[in-house]
Image (cartoon, rainbow, N blue to C red):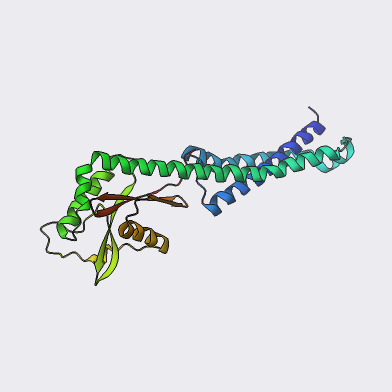
Amino acid sequence: MNAKQLVKISNYIGFISIILLVYWVFTFILIEVFGLKVFRKNMTDSFYLSVLGILAMMAGALIINIMFNLTRIAQKHNNDEEVSKNNKKIIITLLLIFPTIAIILFGGDYLTKKKKEELLINSAEYIIKISQEKTNKLVDYKFSKNYIINTADILEQYSNTDRNFPNVRLIVKDTIDKNQVYLIFNDYASFKENDTLVPRKNNYIYKTTKIERDYLDNVFNKNNTEVRFSSSDGDYELFYPYKKGNKTIILYFSEHQRYGKL
């Protein structure tokens, strides 16, 4: 293999490395800016590490070019004819890869969200199915120390059912000074049954956005039983209404996920 062939190969390697790096940066920007979750953990880690391989190829190609004095060799020995039509096709193909990458990433993120929604709904249905009696106790809401302690125990049992089970909390409707509020309870009670500490409703108020507030109003005031799922930058949450007689509660599932499912 002579110097001209080495320079030609290094040119190809350098050009391909630059193109790959541009695609990598474009992909990285889309993932970070839009909070896309597409690939599983191992694939995500491999993707981030791949830039080192690309940079290594570029560095190797650059060293070869410097060693064989690319400019002088190319000017003296390169007699290849340029084919403008082929170049045009190559450029168009390279440009079309950008929207293809975007479609794949956004499509993968959408599929990840649908998969997570299905998982959370299945988790809610599974909990209610195997813990019907405990769930019915949650429906009999009355703001008291005993209820808070029992609720924390039940929610803790829910969370410990499966190692991969998402965080689960309870949302109920109540009033403070004749104003309607929503309270939220988790699997931790800050006091025990024999403590003299008196619980305060203000400590359990669930801070909501307008969209969440409208949804909760429809569930508790208008008997809407529609499940609500939302996701943002790896944060997934599911509001799962449960009704018994004329009483309603909402099991609130939440989970943060750094990686995708595909």
Q: Position of residue 106 (x, y in %)?
A: 56, 46
Whether residue 73 is visible, yes or no, is: no
- Position of 229 with respect to 6 (left or right) is left
Task: Give the total number of marks visible in the rendering.
Answer: 0
Whether residue 57 is visible, yes or no, is: yes
Q: Position of residue 216 (x, y in %)?
A: 35, 59
Residue shown at the point (43%, 52%) measured from the top left: 230
Quarter assignment of residue 246: bottom left
Near-viewer residue (166 or 180): 180
Residue shown at the point (75%, 34%) measured from the top left: 9
Q: In which quadrant will I find the N terminus? A: top right
Near-viewer residue (146 or 68): 146
Q: Position of residue 52 (x, y in %)?
A: 59, 42
Q: Position of residue 218 (x, y in %)?
A: 36, 58
Quarter assignment of residue 219: bottom left
Residue shown at the point (31%, 60%) measured from the top left: 221
- Position of 122 with respect to 5 (left or right) is left
- Position of 22 with respect to 12 (left or right) is left
Q: In the rendered image of this protein, does residue 183 appear above or below residue 115?
A: below
Residue shown at the point (24%, 47%) measured from the top left: 156
Furthest residue toward bottom: 177
Furthest residue toward top: 1
